[in-house]
Image (tube, rainbow, N blue to C red):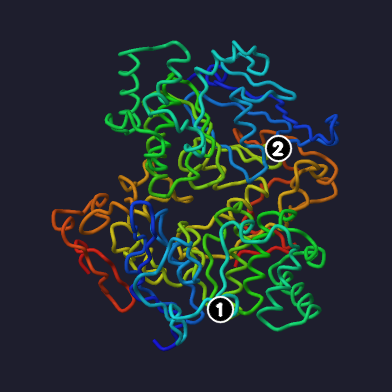
Amino acid sequence: MQSTEERVIMEVIDLKKHFDLTKGFIKKTHSKIKAVDGLNFQVYKGETLGIVGESGCGKSTTGQLMLGLLDATEGHIYFQNEDISAMSQEELRKARRDLQVIFQDPYSSLNPRMTVEQIIGEPLVVHGLASGKELKEQVRELMKLVGLREHQMKLYPHEFSGGQRQRIGIARALALKPKVIVCDEAVSALDVSIQAQILNLLKKLQKEMNLTYIFIAHGLPAVRHISDRIGVMYLGKMVELADRNELFEHPLHPYTYALLDSVPIPDPKLRKEHQLIKGEIPSPINPPSGCPFHPRCPFATEKCKIEVPEYREILPNHFVACHYPLLQEDTNVLPDSGISKVK
Amino acid sequence: MNNELLKVDDLKVRFKTDEGYVSTVNGVSFSVEQGETLAIVGESGSGKSVTSLALMGILPANGEIYEGAITFEDKDLRSLSKKEYRKMRGDDIAMIFQEPMTALNPVFTIGYQLRETLIVHNNMNKEQAHKKGIEMLETVGIPDSDRVMGRFPHQLSGGMRQRVMIAMALSCNPKLLIADEPTTALDVTIQAQILTLLRNLKKNSNTSIIIITHDLGVVAELADRVVVMYAGEVVEVAPIQELFDNPRHPYTRGLISSIPKIHDVVDELYSIEGTVPNPSNMPTGCKFHPRCPLADIECTKVHPELEYISEKHAKRCIKVKG
């Protein structure tokens, strides 16, 4: 058994990213969007950490910060004990060999004027790792690895379907033999039958290449399928983080509970009334005081309006930020407060 | 069945492209009964959205129905003039789209757009229309509906815009509501709100609904009956429970088993190999054969008919018996 320090490949400490909203010619800052507002978590070697949340929760910003694509406003991101947020451009460039990304829409992230061969080989060329015959050989290997055929080398991205384009994106991300891959909504735009192909491919590659994934998505079934642990974000904060089964079977945060309950289940026998949470996600420009979820939470009290709940390890490996976590036996009925109950 | 509201018979739709005509809907037949919710399921390129546009008479300029019949009540929709069709849309058939931002007019207020619908279709005056508009917004769960009437579409969130679209679609009490991926662009908690809204509509009125989606979760939540489409054809029709319990077509089976289950985690997902064929280059015989685990030489030659295996359950496959 490794010690915790050895297991951790990335660590995020008090991470914040605030975007300035400016106005007028002199760009005076009049307010801030708190996209990420105080995150703390660790990523273990070889695991898949899922990050879920709805639009505006800051999950994609978190991914970009972890890749060093955005500068953090506050806090630290450690990758193998080195602080990414303090790195120079040159150091970052080196670190990126180990930190790669797969995007949602492989069409807009692949250069339409480059052939597949050039796209997949580009990282190797940029980092001066291969050229000529060797480059071609490596590209061929990568294409085989992700299930593309050799004769497709000279084709352009538009000649591929969505699923195949995602395979190109994956091959490119793998070119530098990275340690960590951030998958930002990597399967969200794909049809179910294709989504299954890509999820299986990602799992296979993880096993073969000992990869660590940070899997950012809003589609909960896919996240549950691929992740070992899952973190739930709401308005720039991590509200809960636990092993996937623990999170799905015993959610402690009322938001997690409602989120899981909202997912339509593909089985007509399990048709039920959803426990709707009222209202919509507030704007991150002016988030609610105290617990960000309190205006929509059926359990909220005065305390929740004033005090920000601490993010803490409430059970072993189960973190939650809530004053009143759902610890009692009877967690499958939320109190009646204008929301519908289980039938 | 005599309470049939809509009947689509052997519908074929083609598009004019630089390479000649491409047919994307190839002989689709189904019917919708009064008060029934029918789901049309399929992946991108299955022709499900084109079918719905054809029903509404709003195909893009390069598209046309070149064969088949659409009968609504006793009217043949293909014989309607443009003006008659326009009257029909809104009065009898209404549609909601995936992204309401593109369906709402950005330069008019919500109130203006709601009132206009009511004035044109229900012969109301402006005041009556305004009152009814507020009422409709309340029915779809918009708080503060008085103020929302004065808002522009961009000032509302995605979920709110979808509610406005639904309010507008329902404002003339249509007999049939066509919902094309109504929740696909929404967050999951908002999706649950909209699905509940549609379910209540189903419960409290006799409106028939056609819901077009790729999400079998949404289908399981709402539909009474399901039509599965693949490559421009209907490959299976079945009542909802029957479809999930006893899917007959290999494509339907694959589709159901390739969804990650939230309550039942497996190590590897079932996946259908390959991709949806290109409409300009369709496989011979059964269109699913290149991806089908059961396909043999016969499947590459014979184009299977849609065959009823029981009163309500049909499949288009020669390999699966019964």
Q: B15 and A21: which one is in front?
A: B15
Give the chain letter at badge 1: B
> Quadrant of the image for the C terminus of chain A?
bottom right
> Where does the image place residue B278, in percent across and percent down from the top left?
33, 51
- Image position, residue A250 (x, y; %): 58, 47
Task: Specify the amino acid type for callout 2.
Answer: Gly
Q: Residues within 10 Å of mark 1 (few under 14, many from 20)?
A: few
Residue B94, given in percent of the width and then of the height, sits at 57, 73
Q: Residue at x 32, y 33 (%)?
A: A148
* Amino acid at the residue labelled 1: Lys
Residue at the spot 23% in from the left edge and 59% down from the top edge: B286
Left or right: where A142 falls relative to A90: left
Mark nearer the viewer, 2 or 1 = 1
Is residue B233 placed above or below B267 in the rendered structure? below
Q: Chain of mark 2?
A: A
In the image, residue A146 sits, relative to residue B103, either above or below, namely: above
Mark 2 to mark 1 CA distance (whole Å): 51 Å
Q: Secondary structure at mark 1?
A: helix
Which element type, helix, strand or loop, lies under badge 2? loop
Circle 2 residue: A236
Q: Which mark is residue B83?
A: 1
Whether residue B42 is situated above or below residue B202 in the rendered picture: above
Q: Looking at the image, which is closer to me, B20 or A231? A: B20
